[in-house]
Amino acid sequence: MTTIPYAATSAPSTVRGISSRIGAIDALRGLVMLFMLIDHIRETYFLHMQVSDPVDAATVDPALFFTRLISTFCAPTFVALTGLSAWLYGQSHSRQETSLFLLKRGLFLIFLEVTFVGLAWSLKFPPQTFWLQVIWAIGISMVALSALLYLPRPWQIALGLAIVCLHNLLDGIRLLPGDSGFALWAILHQRDVIDLGGGLTAKTTYPVLPWIGLILLGHAIGPWFARGRDGAERRRRLVLLGGGMLVAFLLLRWCNFYGDKPWVAGVDGLRTIMAFLSLTKYPPSLLFLLSTLGVGALLLALFEKYESHRIMGWLSLFGGAPMFFYLLHLYVLKALYFTALGLYGPTKGAVFGVESVGTVWLWFFILTPVLYFPTRWFARLKQRRKDIWWLKYL
C-alpha cells in the first residue's frame, strides 16, 4: 500500500493542527491498513481454509466469510485515496512535476512488488513465479494516472465511470495462452498465468483495468478537498455519494442481472445474506466497488466530522506510513509463522495453522499495538528528516 506524501501527520498521536480533510484521509487509510492486517493474518495462519473468489457463501463458515468481507474494503478505498492524494499533491506542484512523481512512484511500487513484497510472501529467491498483486495494481494505476491527469476533469470522470461501470461487459472475453494479446489482456482484465520463458511465470492476481478507472475517479473528486472549501458541504457530498452508491448496489444486486456473478438464496436467512454480499474482487466487479466505496465515502465524512477524536490520531499514524507498515507486517508475519512451524511442526496438513477464526482475531489484537510503535517511529522520522529523499517513497 502506498500514498502520495501531500501532507503528513505532525504528531502521530493526534491530528490536531492538521486540516480536518487531511486528517480524515489519513485516518481512513489507517483503518483499511488494519483491515488488511486481519486478512493477512488469516492468510498466514488459516491458509488451510482458503476461500474462493467470490467466496462460496453456501459452504464457507460464516465467521470466516465475514472476516474476509471486512478486508474487501482495503484495496478499493486505498486506490481511490491514492487518486485523491495525487490531486492534493498537484495543488502545490506543477502538472509536469505531479506526473513525473506519479510515474516514478508507480515504477517504484512495481519494483517492490516483484522483489521485497514477493519475497515476503514466497521466501524464494530468485523467484520462479511473480505474483502481481495489490502493490503492482496500485503502481500500474499510478503510472496510468501520470498520463491521464493531462485530460480535462470532465474527461477523467467520463473515462473513469466508463471503465468502472462497463468493464463487466468484458467478462466474457477469454483469451488463451498463445492467442494474440493474451499477456496484455491478462494484465488488464483476465486473471491468469503468463509464461515469461526460462521457467518463469507471472500470475496476474490483480488485473489492473478497473483499478485504473478507480484511481481516475479518486483524482476527479479532488476539488471537493481543495483548501478553503466548506467542510460541511464536503461531508454532505460524501454522504450523498456514499449513500447513492449503496442504494445503486442494493438495486443492482437485487435485480441480479449485471455487475457481478448472480446470487442464489441460501438455505436460511444468514446464508442468503452471505450470498447477496459475496462479490468478485479479482478483478473488482462494479457491485464490489459500489459497496466498498459507498461505505468508504460515508466513513470519510464521519472521520472528518470527528477528526479531533483521539482514535483518529491513532488511525492516522498507520495511514501516514503505509508502505513501511505494509512491508513490516509481511515480514513480521512470516517470522512468526516459521517460528510456530519450527516449534509445533505442520498442524494442518503440510502447513502450520490455527483451529479457529477467533485465534486470527486474537493475533490481530496482539499485533496491532506491537506494530504501532515501529510505525510511529518511522512516521516521526519522515517528519524530522525531510532531507532524506527516499523516505517519501515509504
Image (cartoon, helix red, strand yellow):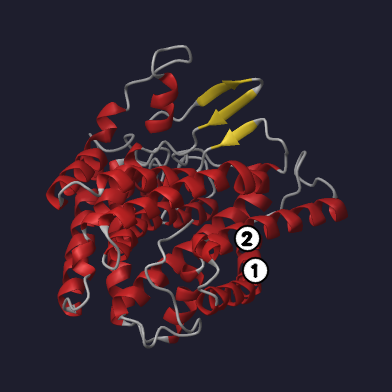
- Residue at (68%, 42%) from the top-left corner? 122
Q: Which circle, 1 or 2, is nearer the viewer?
A: 2
Type of the residue with mark 2: His
Label 2 sits on residue: 329
- Residue at (37%, 51%) from the top-left corner? 100
- Residue at (40%, 25%) from the top-left corner? 184
- Residue at (45%, 62%) from the top-left corner? 32
Q: Residue furthest left?
A: 154
Q: Quadrant of residue 293?
A: bottom left
Mark 1 or mark 2: which comes first in sequence?
2
Q: Which mark is residue 156?
A: none
Is there a contact, CB below 8 Å, between mark 1 and mark 2?
yes
Label 1 sits on residue: 367
Q: Nearer the viewer, residue 235 or 251?
A: 235
| 14 relative position to 131: left or right | left
User: Residue 226's spot in the image, x, y percent?
Assistant: 21, 71
Give the secondary structure at mark 1. helix
Q: Is residue 196 visible?
A: yes
Q: Nearer the viewer, residue 260 or 95?
A: 95
User: Residue 207's spot in the image, x, y percent?
Assistant: 42, 36
